[in-house]
Image: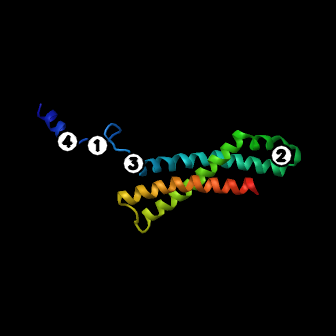
Amino acid sequence: MSGTKQADSRPLSPHLGIWRYHATMFASITHRFTGMAMYFGTFLIAAWLVALASGPDAFAVFEPIISSIPGQVILFLWTVAVLFHLANGIRYLFWDGPHIGFDPKTASAVSVFNYVFAVLASVAIWAVVLLA
């Protein structure tokens, strides 16, 4: 009986039921997902380059796929993933190196900035490419 009473008085580790969601947590999870998503997008780019190098017939088969609306959406999302992963990786370098940005307000602000940067920079890159 005394063992049970002692176990009940110990603090519990945080879990999903009591954990407060914040931008830094979402940025960390997004960093992992963008890392995985970049594999698929890079495979698509590599397949396009192989088709380009294989000659006009192979390129003619692959070009409609990559220039279709779903193909363009995938490439846009790949651009967002690459830019987010880049910006968030820089944040991790500051955390690991000079230990800058650990206080919660700064960490949250940088996390939100990384999302905004990834989307706005992707829109800018695609605007330049499509309007050129």
Tag shown at residue 22: 3
- Label 4 with label 1: CB-CB less than 8 Å: no
Residue assigned mark 2: 59
Q: Taking 76 as reference, is 13 left or right?
A: left
Alpha carbon distance from label 3 to label 4: 26 Å
- Tell me the crowding category of disc 3: few under 14, some 14 to 19, or many 20 or more residues within 10 angstroms, Cα based: few
From the viewer's side, name the closer residue of 86 and 67: 67
Residue 88 screen position, x and y as percent:
50, 57
Chain-order first, disc 2 or disc 1 = 1
Residue 97 screen position, x and y as percent:
44, 67
Alpha carbon distance from label 2 to label 1: 55 Å
Alpha carbon distance from label 2 to label 3: 45 Å
Residue 79 screen position, x and y as percent:
63, 51
Q: Which callout, 2 or 3, points to the residue nearer the camera?
A: 3
Tag shown at residue 13: 1
Residue assigned mark 4: 10
Alpha carbon distance from label 3 to label 1: 18 Å
Give the residue displayed 47% in from the left and 50% down from the top: 27
Chain-order first, disc 4 or disc 2 = 4
- Label 4 with label 2: CB-CB less than 8 Å: no
